[in-house]
Image (tube, rainbow, N blue to C red):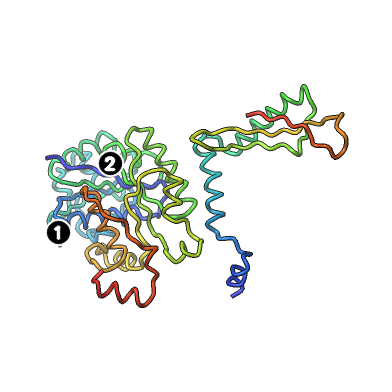
Amino acid sequence: MSGKAITITSGKGGVGKTTITANLAVTLAALGRRVTAIDTDIGLRNLDIIMGMESRIIYDIVDVAEGKCHLLQALIRDKRLPNLHLLPASQTSDKTAISPEDMSAICKELKADNDFVLIDSPAGIERGFQNAVASADDIIIVTTPEVSAVRSADRVIGLIEMSGKGPGRLIINRVKPAMVKRGDMLDTFDVIEFLAIDLLGVVPEDESIIVAANKGVPLAYEQSPVASRAFHNIARRLTGETVPFLSIFEEPDTLWNRLQRTLRGH
Amino acid sequence: MEEFFARLFGRRQASKTIAKERLRLVLVHDRAGIPPELLNVIKNEILTVISKHVKVERDGIEMNLSHSQGQTRLVADIPIVSYRSRPGSPRKRKTAA
C-alpha cells in the first residue's frame, strides 16, 4: 500500500519547520511507521543537522534528480530507528536544480516503500516552496503566535488553496503559556480564528529543543520534555487517532505541577 | 514593578490586543490584494472625480477596507462642504460603498 506525502511549510523562515519535520519523523518511526524525511531546502540544508546525520551524506536529492545515483543510495538510515530515513538536500546547487516533476517522481518512489514521506519545505513562496507543495497529499502549515508569522501563514494558506492542495492543517509552535496568560501573546484560539483552518497541534516553547539541536538528537527520542509530548500527540493525529489537545494553558509552571508531571512520567 | 502598577490600575494595554488589531488590518489588505499604497491611489482618483462636481473636505476623508461576514468592502466616507448648513449643524456626508 502506498504511503502519504506530507509537506511541512510556513512562508516565514525560522518558525520551526525543520525541527517539527525531524521530530514528527522520529515520533512516527517510533510508532512503528516507515518514514522518510526529505529536505527540499536546496542550497541551505539543515534537516541533516537536526537529525544528526550530517557526517553520513554521500549523495543528495539533486544527485538523484540528475540521475547520478539511485534514490536508495542517497537515503541515510537513522542509527536508532531502522525504519527512518533522510533524503538530504544539496548544499551547493541552487533552487532551480529540482523541478516539480523531479519531486513528484522521487515522492512516488518513496511512497511505495514508506507509510509517511515528510517533505520539509524551504521558507518563502518561490520555486522551492512550489516544489514541496506540488507532490503533497497533505499539508502542514507551521506558525508561531506572532503577527509576522501568522500573516505569512495566511498568505501561504491562500497559495495552497489556489493550487488545489489546501487548506492543510496548522501547527502553532513556540507558544509560551506564561505570556499567553498575561495577555502578551496570541493564544491558540486567536490564531485559529484568523487563519480559519483546522488545528493539528500546539507545541510549547521548550529549551530542550535547542539542547537537542546542539546534540543532533531530535527531542522526540525522549518522552519527558513537554514539547516532545506535543510531537507525540501530533504524530498520533497524523496516523488517524483522535488525541485531545495539550492543556498547556491549564498547567501553570509551578514547582508542584512540575513535580506532578515528573511523577506521572511526562 | 512600574509595569505591575500600570497593569494594576489598568493603564497598560495587553500587547495581544494591539497584535490582533494590527493583524486584522494587515490580513484584510493582504486577502483583498489591495496594499495600503494602492488604496491611496484609488482614494485620490475617486476624489478627482467627485471634486469635479462637488467641493469635498479633503482633511475629513476616510477610506478603508473592512471585512465582515465573509465579504470585503471598500468603505469611503467623504465629507462634502455644504454652504447652506449653519455653523455647528451636522455636516452632510456622502457615503459610497
Specify few, some or many for label 1: CA neighbours under 10 Å numbering under 14, 14-19, or 20 or more: some
- Return the residue nearer the eye: A129 or A247: A247
Q: Which mark is residue B13?
A: none
Looking at the image, which residue is at 34% across and 43% down?
A: A94
- Return the residue nearer the eye: B12 or A110: B12
**The N terminus of chain A - image quarter:** top left
Q: Dividing the picture into quarters, in which one does residue A82 lie?
A: bottom left
| Residue A140 percent across, percent down from the top left | 32, 46
Report whether residue A87 is seen: no
- Chain letter of the residue beneath label 1 in the structure image: A
| Residue A113 percent across, percent down from the top left | 12, 44
Q: SS class of the residue under badge 1?
A: loop
Identity, as a three-letter code, of the amino acid under mark 1: Leu
Q: Is residue A14 left or right of residue A261?
A: right
Q: Give the mark nearer the N terminus: 2 vs 1.
A: 1
Q: Dividing the picture into quarters, in which one does residue A78 lie?
A: bottom left
Q: Which residue is mark 2?
A: A138
Identity, as a three-letter code, of the amino acid under mark 2: Asp
Disc nearest the viewer among 2 and 1: 2
User: Are dots 2 and 1 in contact, CB under 8 Å?
Assistant: no
Above or below A13: residue B60 = above
Q: Which mark is residue A81?
A: 1
